[in-house]
Amino acid sequence: MLNRDKTVAIIGQGYVGLPLAMAAVDSGWRVIGIENSRSKFELIASGISPVEDVASTKVQIDLASGAYRVSNNVADVAEASIVVICVPTPLDADRAPDLAILEQAVRDISPHLSDGTLVINESTSYPGTVRDFISPLIESLKSSPSVSIDLAVAPERVNPGDKVWAQKNTPRLVGGLNEMSTKRAVDFYSSICDEVVQVSAPEIAETAKLLENTFRLVNIALVNQLAQLCADQNINVHEVIDAASTKPYGFMKFTPSVGVGGHCIPVDPMYLSWWAANNGGRASIIEHSDEINLGMPIYVSRRVRELLPTGVGRVMILGVAYKPGVKDVRETPVTSLRDDLLAHGCKVGWLDPLVADWEGSAPVDPSWECDVIVIATAQPGLPVEALSKRGIPILDCTGTFKELANVVRL
Ligand SMILES: NC(=O)c1ccc[n+]([C@@H]2O[C@H](COP(=O)([O-])OP(=O)(O)OC[C@H]3O[C@@H](n4cnc5c(N)ncnc54)[C@H](O)[C@@H]3O)[C@@H](O)[C@H]2O)c1
């Protein structure tokens, strides 16, 4: 007989859900990973991990031991005492929160939840999502009024590609709708993580998660704006940042870049500004930071074209993923850079050792003839050293390659 008390179902087996599933297995849980994308389900079922931070061998071992099962049948949540939701929470066309996927996941699971199940939301969203959005939906869709459901939030803090901070050693914020929900969620994460931080309400954890990512967005915007101001006045912004970084307190180093990307930094702060506006306030610092970061690829495009004698030519972009070490191209600012270069008549080729297909286009060969190279993401394995010997200008937006010939930093 299966032990429901030691079974957890995780909805969504992506960048957040799969590492959590593997960590839960390591902590003695039986895990059912529910995945509704047919291709991802089949990939995982065949023992292949779709995310960089989880080795396929790990998936294979956990599948073989029976401690982990991937399923595309949401009714399997009935076997679990805990259900954790790890599905995307993107923006809509107006850059406002789009909770359609989260809503669908809650609609899918609700009729199948067993009495006494603890549902935890890990997906990032605005304050009040668990209390005002998820809870009423579950209550209206659960199989019977006598079914009692506990609810908590534990925002994911995963940093894909990070070799130091992972599920186990990253402190976890937990807030439940009531004492029992909080206690059960704290117990669950205490079995997986070294440190669990209990907060007084789900809204504290939800808002803290948005503060963390907004902190990054705003500081990235600050340094991106400073980079443009310094370049105009011939001041080396990297030397400025290194100098400021010698202050032992009250300063944290951020470096200029082609912009922000991924599913978190460009997205989550918009949940906070939408929530502020919805409540009659205004998070103007977020709006302005977003504007600066969205403008960076356009600024970089201008800097690239200034390196071409006629302002147009063949440009090779190195690194298209939104950050080094991952193949994820979601929200990558490199898309805007490419589009702006194309709009100004340039021909663009790209190369990224981790990305085989980017929005339907294939990478070029490193020998591709071009007039200028722009390093957008410092992806491991890029042939930068060999390419620098060609003698053509290279604009490095990552600040990584200062020792090489012909390299100009942003
Ligand atoms: N990726 C990150 O670095 C990161 C970090 C912290 C927090 N988050 C947050 O975590 C959440 C999940 O992000 P992610 O990066 O893991 O997304 P992801 O796209 O990598 O994975 C989500 C998975 O959920 C699946 N899915 C969607 N609806 C489903 C449903 N109804 N039933 C079963 N499976 C379903 C999708 O097919 C996908 O495989 C988001 O809210 C995100 O903001 C992400």
Image (cartoon, rainbow, N blue to C red):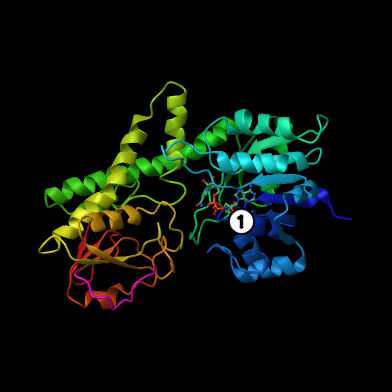
Vertically, is 363 above or below 189? below
Residue at the spot x=42%, y=26% of the render? 277
Of residues 5 and 351, the one drawn nearer to the viewer in this rendering: 351
Q: Is residue 368 magenta?
A: yes
Residue at the spot x=53%, y=64% of the render? 52
- Is 384 left or right of 275, judged from the image as shown? left
Q: Is residue 324 magenta?
A: no
Where on the picture, by quarter, is residue 99? top right
- Residue 186 seen in the current view: no
- Is 377 left or right of 138, judged from the image as shown? left
Residue at the spot x=71%, y=43% of the render? 109
Q: Is mark 1 within 8 Å of ligand 1?
A: yes
| Quadrant of the drawing holding the C terminus | bottom left
Reading the image, the residue beneath label 1 is 37
Residue 38 point in image, percent of width and height = 63, 59
- Is 351 left or right of 374, judged from the image as shown? right
Range of residues picked out in magenta: 362-371
Residue 184 point in image, percent of width and height = 73, 40
- Residue 287 seen in the current view: yes
| Quadrant of the drawing holding the N terminus | bottom right
Residue at the spot x=34%, y=30% of the render? 284
Residue 51 point in image, percent of width and height = 55, 62
